[in-house]
Amino acid sequence: MTRILAVRLDSDGDVLLTGPAIRALSELGTVDLLASPSGAAAARLLPGIHTVLEYDAPWSGFRPPAVDTEAALELVERLRTTGYDRAVIFTSFHQSPLPMALLARMAGVGHIVGTSMDYPGSLLDVRLKRADPPGGGHEVDAALEVAVAAGATRPEHPTLRVRRPLPPPPDRLPADLRSGGYVVLHPGASVPARGLRADHAAAIAAALSAAGHAVVVTGGPAERELVAETVALTLRVCPGAPVLDLAGTTDLAGLASVLEAADCTVVGNTGPAHLSAAVGTPVVSLFSPVVPAERWRPYGVAVTLLGDQQALCRDSRARDCPVPGHPCLSGVSGAEVVAAVAELIQSIDHPVRTGYDVGTAPLSTSRGVR
């Protein structure tokens, strides 16, 4: 059977958006995914993957590691030993597939596919080009185009999905909310310009609470302080409001479980927006235009996009907001969010979820490649 190496050396959200392309490739043979440490948790949630390999690439990420010759040679040897028939390298528009293509070629991979604006020499057997932003289609569609170029068939109705079963809701979620009936607010983001400030998130939480919604505020371990401040500010305005702090209490699969039971997710442009889409929960997307929404908005699920898409930071790819006050998002009022949530809840038949993948085989995981 054909052995395929898929590569996505990015964070969780990017990996989730590659899911439909990886499932398409899995129709051709066994697919292993090479992921970065920051994307490995999402990789382990994707259907269609046999083994997850990890590699901390020195050409990817906001704070990439120094070049580690030994680690690179270990990766080459691991790929050579496995004997991949083809490599399919998924990248965003500002990234190059060529460093990875070189390692794959050194490992003896005979057919390599990727998108490159630079001359690839003999490193790519199939080279795709993509229109400059904001063109070039959504990231999901761009990844599917690469998979099709590698021989896959494009699915008629691609959606994001996760492996089943998910873990049960965390113990901190009250019994009366464990089957749903709440709105998730996720204020943080790995890129600060794409997330919410605590005072703004608190105003949204207070408005949702006043409208009768229980609010579950989520965040990763690094976002505990932001979430704690959000909840404290909310309770200062609305003492006794049903607002729960779940920051740092779940892994990514546990967060997926929390998102799946929610009526709606309110979130910036960050991984949990795509995780919400992957479990079929509608999204109110407070989208900072530092990257184009045409490429990065939640995919395949009901979405209301809020935020000034013509703001001065548009297409700047800024990590920190370059405009005082973060006006592209801070101008979105709690009332606007409440209205968007109400509209999505009314328009969605919640028992029908799009993010299911039933009967997926257990995932084999490898941590041997650094």
Image (tube, rainbow, N blue to C red):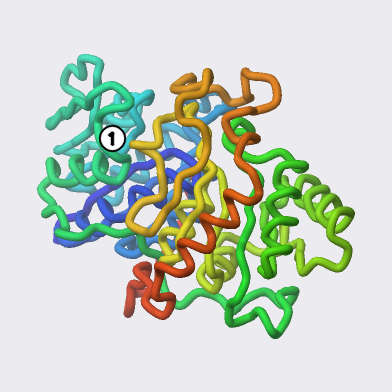
Say which quadrant the N terminus sits in. bottom left
Residue drawn where x is 39% and y is 58% of the image: 302
Task: Find residue 283 and report its horizontal and vertical position in percent.
Answer: 48, 56
Task: Find residue 351 and report its horizontal and vertical position in percent.
Answer: 41, 80
Residue 317 in view: no
Question: Circle 1: is it few (<14), some (14-19), or many (20+) Cα within 10 Å?
Answer: many
> In the displayed structure, does residue 29 sit left or right of residue 49?
left
Residue drawn where x is 69% and y is 59% of the image: 217
> In the displayed structure, does residue 216 sit left or right of residue 21?
right
Task: Decide which of 251, 192 is in the foreground and name it.
Answer: 192
Task: Find residue 332 and report its horizontal and vertical position in percent.
Answer: 60, 40
Task: Find residue 307 and report its horizontal and vertical position in percent.
Answer: 52, 37
Q: What residue is disc 1 on?
A: 104
Residue drawn where x is 23% and y is 24% of the image: 131
Q: Secondary structure at mark 1?
A: helix
User: How many discs appear?
Assistant: 1
> In the displayed structure, does residue 112 sit left or right of residue 250?
left
Residue drawn where x is 86% and y is 68% of the image: 240
Task: Decide which of 62, 340 is in the foreground and name it.
Answer: 340
- Depicted 266 relative to depicted 326: above or below: below
